[in-house]
Image (cartoon, rainbow, N blue to C red):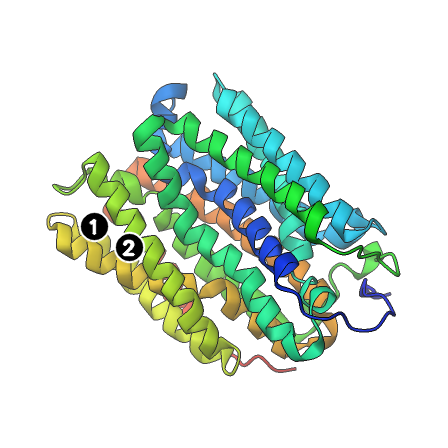
Amino acid sequence: MTLTSPTPTTAAPTFRWPPVLVAALATFTVVTAEMMPVGILTPIAGALDIAPGIAGTSLSITGIVAAIVAAAAPVISGRLDKRTLLSSFLLLLAVANVMSALATSFAMFAMGRVLIGVAMGIVWANAGGLGPRLADPRNIGRAMTTIFSGVSVGMVLGLPAGTFIAALAGWRAAIWTVAGLALIAAILVRVTFPSMPVAQRARLAGIFTPWKHRGVRSGFFITALVVIGHFAAYTFVRPVLEGGSAGGELAIVIALVIFGIAGIVGNFAIGAVSHQDPRRAIIIALIGIAAGAAALSFATGQQWLVWLVLVVWGAAYGGIGVATQAWNRISDPTQVDASSSMLSGVFNGSIAIGSFAGGLVFDAFGGTAIMLLGAAVVLIGLVATLASRPTA
């Protein structure tokens, strides 16, 4: 049995910017919600009276839940209209962030993170199939690049924006802001999206079909390695920077903003390469991520050097979302919906593994150790990429 693609039999739609941009806003919002604790890890730990490593597991909680939900998203979603589905789970995202913002204990904060994982798993997994539903064949590539730029930009810009808000008004204000953004996104989905009914219900037995394809399977493996390595290190960027002479509150905000701006540039620069040659795009990205993670701890004594390292790291990581999606799309164009759902599951599961393992290493051995370990895992991903091709 196979996972049936939930595409209707109607004629191809005309490309329209409003729903495509709103889809990008939706992916930006869920990823920003997931990444938010990274930039405010220290104040969260202080407010909830826990160690930074324990606070870092909030990413693991969200990642594990999102991974499970995303992998099963085609079955969970059933035949519910995409517009209703996405707006409903964006509303859930808003509620989950309200719960996190009001948390007075780690247990309450963790419950909010569980709900964020549920919402993220559904929204991100369904985003992979929106391109063909919102654009004609000639413009599908442009639509998909725009939609998944929300993922990349959320990872690299949402974080410094939240950190900046937290510096001005506290960490709870940053999470309240994400709740408001999720509510806006839910409303805009209802207003701008056309009705997108699902023609056929996906079958549970077909969830793991993408793993049977060698090219797609290698893409999942590479994605897992780079995401585990990146988040093992990146989750603890703030504590590492605080340990150096350039680790003041304003300096950290500026550093993360620089990382975000570099990431946006990298998203479109590496994304342009990925449509023609996703393997080359991933190789470029992995070299930059490994170099940035390995160098950061040794750069914290000089502000300009921190900025340089974060430019390299941010630009490299900014293109990973688009490049890995392109790898899977080229590997097996007939299973885009199924492979996209599974890829988001792999991605989020890897975030959980990376941030959890990173927390253990950080608490036991410190910032330099986790940065070097993260770089080493990414380099293993580089070796796997060099030995693979996005083909059958």
**Residue 93: x %, y % from top left:** 61, 37
Q: Residue 179 lies in what quarter of the image?
A: top right
- Within 10 Å of disc 1 (Cα), the crowding (few <14, some 14-19, many 20+) is many
Amino acid residing under circle 2? Leu
Going 75% across and 46% down the picture, which residue do you hit?
A: 85
Q: In screen coordinates, is 122 left or right of 221?
A: right
Q: In screen coordinates, is 293 left or right of 198?
A: left
Going 81% across and 65% down the picture, which residue do you hit?
A: 7
Tell me the tag on residue 297: 1
Going 44% across and 75% down the picture, which residue do you hit?
A: 281
172 above or below 232?
A: above
Going 47% across and 51% down the picture, which residue do you hit?
A: 154
Amino acid residing under circle 1? Ser
Q: Are marks 2 and 1 in contact (CB under 8 Å)?
A: yes
**Viewer-nearest of labels 2 and 1?**
1
Considering the numbered disc 1 on the image, is that residue within a helix, a strand or a loop? Answer: helix
**Residue 187: x %, y % from top left:** 66, 41
Considering the numbered disc 2 on the image, is that residue within a helix, a strand or a loop? Answer: helix
Residue at the limit of the structure toward the top, as seen here: 104
Tell me the tag on residue 372: 2
